[in-house]
Image (cartoon, helix red, strand yellow):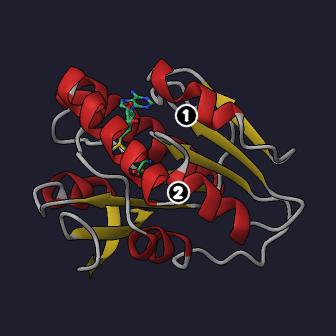
Amino acid sequence: MAHIHLKKHLKYINSFIQSPRSFGTLMPSSPALCNAMVKSVNWNERSLLVAELGAGDGVLTHHILRAMPMDARLSAYEINPDFFHELDDIKDSRLVVRKISAEILDQPYRIIFSCLPFLSLPLRISMKIIKATLQILKQTQGTFILFQYTQRMEKVLSRYFEWERKLVIKNFPPAYVYVCKPKS
Ligand SMILES: C[S@@+](CC[C@H](N)C(=O)[O-])C[C@H]1O[C@@H](n2cnc3c(N)ncnc32)[C@H](O)[C@@H]1O
């Protein structure tokens, strides 16, 4: 078990060294952080379309799938080929792995989770993803749930969303979870 955890951590460290700007972290999200994200959703709605942006090795994907009703569908976006194998190994008919950039949001998602390092990605890409998220969630009256390691995204978020923040200490580093609704 410890061997598997060490292997996972080494993979994250390796990915961070190879592309620090797009990877953005040295450690997978902790169970406490994943739980805080997943518990922010009302899972009682019918036929929910859900997206996860920056799925990595699927650490949050597993939590989402556990919480999701049977009639919901999850699109997990990831661009790093090092993680495709792990995502493809998740056998769940509700999951579609999208091996494309999260800039291409092409379904009426009602819930959009993001693990993306918006502050280190190129600004043009971050803004494209945030604006695409906003457009979709305006149509579906949906919710955007993201985590960040600092509060530096708040200015941008406030331009487009009403949001609430909670701090998750049990993560390395501690992280803020933002639950956002498009401004009307
Ligand atoms: C901080 S890691 C999160 C990994 C995992 N979900 C977690 O919570 O530990 C960010 C992930 O976003 C992916 N990523 C970066 N830019 C992306 C983009 N434009 N579209 C989709 N995924 C992207 C990276 O390859 C990386 O796997």
Q: Secondary structure at mark 2?
A: helix
Name the image quarter holding residue 111.
bottom right
| Neighbour tally class for label 1: few under 14, some 14-19, many 20 plus, Cα within 10 Å | many
The spot of residue 119 in percent (x, y) is: 16, 41
Circles 2 and 1: CB atoms closer than 8 Å: no
Amino acid residing under circle 1: Tyr
Residue corresponding to mark 1: 77
Residue at the location (39% across, 62% down)?
183
Vertical placement of residue 134 versus 124, above or below:
below
Amino acid residing under circle 2: Leu
Position of 37 with respect to 155 (left or right) is right
Residue at the location (23% across, 40% down)?
24
Residue corresponding to mark 2: 60
View quadrant of ligand 1: top left
The spot of residue 165 in percent (x, y) is: 28, 77
Q: Ligand 1 near label 1 (Cβ, under 8 Å)?
A: yes
Q: Which mark is residue 24?
A: none
Position of 115 with respect to 166 (left or right) is right
Residue at the location (44% across, 77% down)?
36
**Alpha carbon distance from label 2 to label 1:** 12 Å
Indicate which disc, 2 or 1, sits on the residue closer to the N terminus.
2
The spot of residue 101 in percent (x, y) is: 47, 23
Does residue 111 show up? Answer: yes
Residue at the location (63% across, 36% down)?
87
